Amino acid sequence: MSIGWLAAGETPAEYVGHHLKHLSVRIGEGPFWVVHLDSLLMSALIGLLGLGTFFFMARRATPGVPGKFQAFIELAVEFIDTQVKDVFHGDRRFVAPLALTIFVWVFLMNALKLLPLDLMPMIAHGLGAEYFRAVPTTDLNITLAMSSTVLLLMFAFAIKAKGAAGFGVELFTAPFHAHSPFVKLLLAPANFALNLIEYLSKPVSLAMRLFGNMYAGELVFILIALLAMAGGNLLALDGLGAKAGGLLAFLGAVLAGAAWSIFHILVITLQAFIFMILTVVYLSMVTEHH
Amino acid sequence: MSINATFLGQLIFFAILIWFSWKFIWPPLMNAIEERQKRIAEGLAASERSKKALQESEAEAQAMLREARAKASEILEQAHQRARQIVEQAREEALAEAARQRAAAEAELEQAVHRARERLRQELAELVVLGAGRVLGREIDPMRHRELLAQLAGEFRA
């Protein structure tokens, strides 16, 4: 949301930069050993909250007449189960809860974006942290970690379905098939390269799609906040023209913020759904034989 | 925007959450849903069964009612027939009795007539004998002229 909060003496560029910096802690030497505390904290909190709610309901679920809350939870569970059933033809006992985890978690992480833009940073600032980014899915580390987990699961599913040897052979013999051993040998490098690209492109596209959507949306929210602040600054000046322009800018920012938020209700749900359904599709693909 | 150890943290946390919902969230919720689906299916089947049973017993009751009606009308018919029979029998008995009575009365009458005739003949015979005796002037011995007298009486009867 676009209720801006500009620190004293901060330029708009600094404001944007401020909002794109993570609360980080260095845990070792080198650029890799840095942890974005804000991303991890928010993703863990919201994950525990969301799945904790499901766990709470799972413990109290009765097969009798369900309460309204249980009915809501079951609605979500059945929705996920139906989606998975349509795509994944096999034992769903692991895939369905995986899809549930992804959908609920990604949705809630994305939904943090509908909080006022400066709310979490202000609270963090009050607690002494200089930077804080509230939406974990605008951090590529988070989305890439999730899609990499999906990649590992793809390997696990492929090996479980075809055996380690079968999976290894398939890496070199598909998608280009040949009958004579010589041509097979000739095609092996091309097949392997293609499979490598295919396997790597999946988690990368999965992570980049979610991250890109969320990051771009966040930037637009920041810009709308800047517009509102510019309007506020103009309002503070003397002169009728400045006051009228300021009012116009402020109202424009409020309208744009509302519109973008409403649009993002769709986007956050859609992105969570896409991440979930593509995961299931990928897992379904690797379990099928070429 | 660099990849750093946050990646590892999220990877581990994601794995834990997947394991958690795989083991502790999905099974009980799915069990509850499936158990309820089973119960609803059973309930529907039971209601279907009892509907069928109701229909069957209604049909049975209808059949029994029809049978009872038929039996009742049969009994009524039998009663009517029996009544008619009794009346008929009574009438026949009464007629027979009446005929018997009349026959008895007729027989008695016949007997009385016969007796009166017999007496009349006797008296006539005596009179004839007396008259003849007077005409002849002497007593006719009835023992001697019995044959003649009997002949006379026979002619008289005729």
Image (spheres, coloured by chain):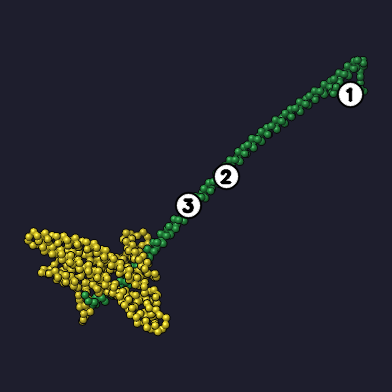
Residue highlighted by disc 1 = B151
Which amino acid lies under the numbered mark 3 shown in the image of this protein?
Leu
Compared to B58, does B116 lie above or below? above
Of callouts 3 and 1, which one flags the residue occurring earlier in the amino acid sequence?
3
Is residue A248 rendered to the left or right of residue A193? left
User: Where is residue B120 shown, x and y percent of the image?
Assistant: 82, 21
Residue highlighted by disc 3 = B54
Total numbered circles: 3
Is residue B131 rendered to the left or right of residue A169? right
Which amino acid lies under the numbered mark 2 shown in the image of this protein?
Lys
Q: Measuring 48% from the left and 54% from the top, which residue is drawn there?
A: B52
Tell me, yes or no, whether dots 2 and 3 are on the same chain: yes
Compared to B19, does A234 lie above or below? above
Of callouts 2 and 3, which one flags the residue occurring earlier in the amino acid sequence?
3
Q: Determine the colour of chain B.
A: green
Crowd around label 3: few <14 · some 14–19 · many ≥20 (10 Å): few
Give the CA distance from mark 2 to mark 3: 25 Å
User: Where is residue A52 shown, x and y percent of the image?
Assistant: 29, 67
A111, A43: nearer the viewer: A111
Quadrant location of the N terminus of chain A in the rendered image? bottom left
The secondary element bearing badge 3 is classed as helix
The secondary element bearing badge 2 is classed as helix
Of marks 1 and 2, the one in the foreground: 2
The secondary element bearing badge 1 is classed as helix
Residue highlighted by disc 2 = B71
Q: Measuring 30% from the left and 68% from the top, which residue is drawn there?
A: A274
The extreme left residue here reads A238
Of callouts 1 and 2, which one flags the residue occurring earlier in the amino acid sequence?
2
Give the CA distance from mark 1 to mark 2: 78 Å
